[in-house]
């Protein structure tokens, strides 16, 4: 990757495309050089200037022979005899490990390389997932410009599926730009790559593996961008144009969803086919399938996950009636207490009778996000109801109030309130904007 040209192109994009009301951030898979969402262009430019390529995290003694991730995968997972012979010959040529037991050394090197690459690939997907989750709490259009050389995801289907699902739910579009630019495969490898094979046929086969691996690295970027409604820019050295294209926002977008009948928790891939009835003059992007979970979630785990997803989203859900009221009181010259009251229509609450009592359970979570989408404060309340008939009648008439308190400094906040019925698994989530002047 030409880091200098990439940094220059990113800087031009920030200057020309980021508007005063926009928020942008820089996030890396290593966690180094991160800038959280901000409108401060100077901070973004400074972070770009300090970005450095991240080397492969492999100890020097384990990087001989220098296997690519795809080559390591072929040896360790696929037990490819041709690739093993190539790596064994390279061990001998490089005198790795003193030249003793070259095949054994090649097997160990492949296993260590592949384990390391899997860890780094999974980390990259987790960083993207966390970023999508953060974006879900922000207003407006949400776009990720993913700059990468790509990586392999052979055994990361669950992580990949989770990322795509989350992006679709949060209306986050992921556009990707292959930072390798325009690349071609050089017979025998580049000057920086290994080319010590004495057998021309073996060398030609190594070229095929190398080219295949480079091509497969970009598959994850192509899939994520396509399945989230984004675009993938590849095979171009025009980084300026690539940033403009990958950073552009769609003029219109539509999200279609469905709930599959008789969903099987088998961990397998299930194909989807989406077609336009009248395709004339239109194009369509749709994922070609999804991976089901291996097992159904326990009700408590399902509730925890649904509440967490709802809190960090901007999508409103009203599965039962709730009225929301907010009021703040100044505690000091710099701090205020915000009271959030959710009035729940008790007719919509699912009660069950045990003896003379009517039992029901609800949970309310309140969260306040600042202008940059950072979580400023949060609180949750569990409400376990055990009402006699007379008390229930009063609650049905007056409604049920649930109160949450948040301590905040002055500023404008996006308030997210989620009320969840434990027994019926129904959820209501609402947004409010509160300004606390000081």
Image (cartoon, rainbow, N blue to C red):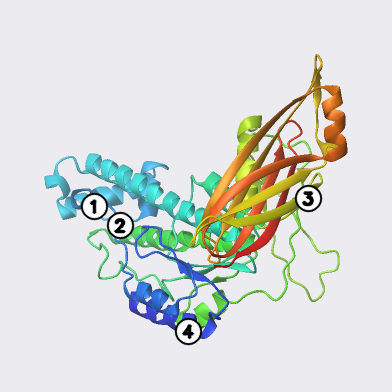
Q: Nearer the viewer, residue 207 or 275?
A: 275
Q: Outermost residue, left direction?
A: 98
Q: Nearer the viewer, residue 24 or 389?
A: 389
Q: Secondary structure at mark 3?
A: strand
Crowding at mark 3 (Cα within 10 Å: few <14, some 14-19, many 20+): few
Q: Are marks 4 and 2 in contact (CB under 8 Å)?
A: no
How far apart are the alpha carbons under marks 1 and 2?
10 Å
Q: Earlier in the sequence, mark 3 or mark 4?
A: 4
Name the disc covering residue 56, or none: 2
Please report whichever mark, 1 or 3, sits nearer to the chain's N-terminal start.
1
Please tell me which residue lies in front, 71 or 419: 419
For residue 411, side relative to residue 419 (left or right): left
Q: Earlier in the sequence, mark 2 or mark 3?
A: 2
Q: Secondary structure at mark 2?
A: loop
| C-beta proximity under 8 Å, tags 2 and 3 | no
How far apart in space, not on screen, are marks 3 and 4 (Cα)?
A: 43 Å
Residue on which disc 1 sits: 63
Dot 1 lies on which element? Answer: loop
Which residue is drawn at the image coordinates 50% and 72% (left, top)?
234
Mark 3 vs mark 4, foreground winner is: 3
Q: Residue furthest top?
A: 355
Say which residue appears at 60% left-offset and 56% top-offset: 329
Residue 118, percent from left and from top: 40, 48
The N terminus appears in which quarter of the rendering? bottom left
Closer-to-camera residue (4/381): 381
Say whether disc 4 or disc 1 marks the residue closer to the N-terminus. Answer: 4
- Sequence-first disc among 4 and 2: 4
Neighbour tally class for label 4: few under 14, some 14-19, many 20 plus, Cα within 10 Å = few
User: Can I make out residue 104 in this image?
Assistant: yes
Disc 4 on helix, strand or loop?
A: helix
Q: Which mark is residue 323?
A: 3
Do residues under tags 1 and 2 come within 8 Å of each other at their CB atoms? yes
């Amino acid at each position: 990757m030409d880091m200098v040209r990439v940094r220059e192109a990113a800087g031009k994009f920030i200057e020309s495309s980021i508007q005063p009301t926009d928020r942008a951030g820089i996030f890396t898979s290593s966690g180094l050089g991160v800038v959280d969402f901000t409108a401060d262009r100077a901070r973004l430019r400074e972070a770009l200037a300090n970005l450095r390529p991240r080397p492969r995290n492999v100890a020097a003694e384990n990087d001989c022979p220098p296997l690519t991730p795809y080559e390591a995968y072929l040896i360790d997972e696929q037990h490819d005899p041709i690739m093993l012979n190539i790596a064994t010959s390279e061990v001998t040529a490089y005198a790795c490990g003193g030249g003793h037991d070259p095949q054994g050394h090649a097997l160990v090197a492949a296993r260590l390389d592949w384990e390391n690459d899997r860890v780094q690939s999974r980390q990259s997907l987790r960083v993207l997932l966390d970023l999508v989750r953060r974006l879900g709490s922000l207003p407006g259009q949400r776009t990720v410009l993913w700059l990468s050389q790509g990586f392999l995801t052979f055994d990361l289907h669950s992580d990949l599926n989770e990322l795509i699902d989350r992006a679709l739910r949060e209306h986050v579009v992921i556009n990707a730009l292959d930072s390798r630019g325009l690349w071609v495969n050089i017979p025998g490898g580049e000057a920086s790559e290994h080319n010590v094979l004495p057998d021309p046929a073996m060398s030609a086969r190594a070229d095929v593996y190398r080219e295949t691996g480079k091509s497969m690295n970009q598959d994850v970027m192509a899939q994520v961008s396509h399945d989230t409604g984004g675009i993938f820019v590849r095979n171009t050295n025009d980084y300026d144009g690539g940033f403009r294209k990958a950073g552009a926002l769609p003029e219109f977008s539509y999200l279609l969803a469905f709930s599959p009948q008789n969903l099987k928790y088998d961990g397998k891939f299930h194909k989807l086919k989406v077609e336009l009835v009248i395709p004339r003059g239109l194009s369509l992007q749709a994922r070609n399938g999804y991976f089901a979970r291996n097992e159904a979630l326990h009700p408590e785990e399902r509730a925890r996950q649904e509440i967490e997803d709802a809190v960090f989203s901007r999508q409103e859900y009203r599965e039962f009636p709730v009225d929301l009221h907010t009021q703040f009181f100044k505690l000091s010259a710099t701090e205020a207490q915000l009271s959030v009251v959710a009035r729940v229509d008790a007719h919509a609450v699912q009660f069950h009778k045990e003896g003379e009592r009517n039992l029901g359970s609800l949970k309310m979570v309140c969260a306040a996000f600042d202008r940059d989408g950072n979580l400023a404060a949060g609180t949750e309340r569990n409400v376990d109801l055990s009402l006699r008939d007379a008390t229930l009648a009063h609650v049905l008439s007056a409604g049920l109030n649930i109160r949450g308190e948040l301590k905040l400094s002055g500023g404008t906040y996006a308030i997210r309130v989620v009320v969840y019925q434990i027994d019926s698994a129904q959820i209501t989530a609402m947004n409010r904007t509160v300004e606390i002047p000081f």
